Amino acid sequence: MNRALSIRSNKNKESSSGGTRHGFSLNSLRGTVQPELSKKLYKLIKSENHLIQCYENAGKERLSIATQLSDWGEATTDDAISDISDKVGVLLSELGEQEDLYAHNIDDSRAILKAIRNTEKSVQPSRDHKAKIADEIAKLKAKEPQSAKLVTLEQELVRSEAENLVAEAQLTNITRQKLKEAYAAEFAATIERAEKQIILARHGRRLLNLLDDTPVVPGDVRPAYEHSNQARQILNDAEDDLRDWQPELEDVPSSAQLESNLMPREQHQQIAQSDMGDESVLHHQHAQGGSSETGVDGSRISSGGSVTTGQPLDSYAPSESEATRSQVA
């Protein structure tokens, strides 16, 4: 437990210890400018921060109550109550330390969730860009269905969909991995806190058994308290049990093996090889005088058709410069 056998020797140290870990930060003002996709997780992470502060405050209250219990026991001038209350105070203060440790562990779990939130923030612009282009195409088709700009917009939409496809895959990969990692860590911390609290509580009940509560009649004198050594040994036993504690957790295996771009390793290699193959096909087609575009599903679409559907586009009237070039040819 790394503390003295009496809580009274730590009064000055407790009063001079530092304050909270969470100070004011301008980061707390960001909530109003979060992308729609990351708003819910942002709120959850903020709520976890409040939870952490609650556990830290609970730990401090435990320490304060432990000190007050020891002070009260000393003031009773009853040797038995004074010693037992002081030793119980030591265990209570250790329970407070466990709350603070648990708060630190939740903070670590919360930091893992931030990776999901940050990825959500990076995916939102990709979704917005794709939706914006699709909206422009729909408006243009309604106003000028024969516009030459449709081809350019549809080509841009294909590129945007391909980029978004990668971003969405990265998001689902990191979400599954980090959600599993974050709550595996939090549940492990919860088990550690619970089992260590059980250890301290059991030794606390051993301490209470040293206090003789047999009623006395007026005028009788209680036997002298002779269990101070046993009480000290109980604290030593509690400290040894905490030191020897080892987690016995059910394994939470992870199959996530991601590259730095958040894509699976094997698929990343396959995509790279596929890209090399696509380049050779394009080179062959350009050598034959043709051109093509690659759709999101990997299908090849000729330049004379729609890049989204692969169907021939409606013909439109050539411009004056095109007609002149055609006559000259």
Image (tube, grey):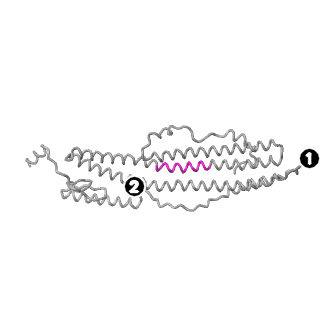
Q: Position of residue 266 (x, y in %)?
A: 40, 61
Residue lying at 46% horizontally and 50% vertically, measured from the top left: 116
Q: Position of residue 298 (x, y in %)?
A: 30, 59
To which quarter of the image does residue 310 belong?
bottom left
Which residue is farthest right?
219
Main secondary structure type of the part rendered in magenta = helix
The one nearer the camera, 73 or 220, is: 220
Which residue is farthest front?
217
Q: Residues within 10 Å of mark 1 (few under 14, many from 20)?
A: few
Label 2 to label 1: alpha-carbon separation = 82 Å
Dot placed on the residue nearer the N-terminal end, 2 or 1: 2
Q: Which residue is mark 2?
A: 169
The residues colored magenta run 101-116
Residue lying at 74% horizontally and 45% vertically, measured from the top left: 7
Side (left or right) of 252 relative to 37 = right
To which quarter of the image does residue 293 belong?
bottom left
Disc 2 marks a residue whose amino acid type is Ala
Q: Are marks 2 and 1 in contact (CB under 8 Å)?
A: no
Residue lying at 22% horizontally and 44% vertically, measured from the top left: 143
Could you say whether the residue bearing mark 1 is in a helix, strand or loop? loop
Which mark identifies residue 219?
A: 1
How many marks are shown on the rendered structure?
2
Q: Position of residue 132 (x, y in %)?
A: 32, 45
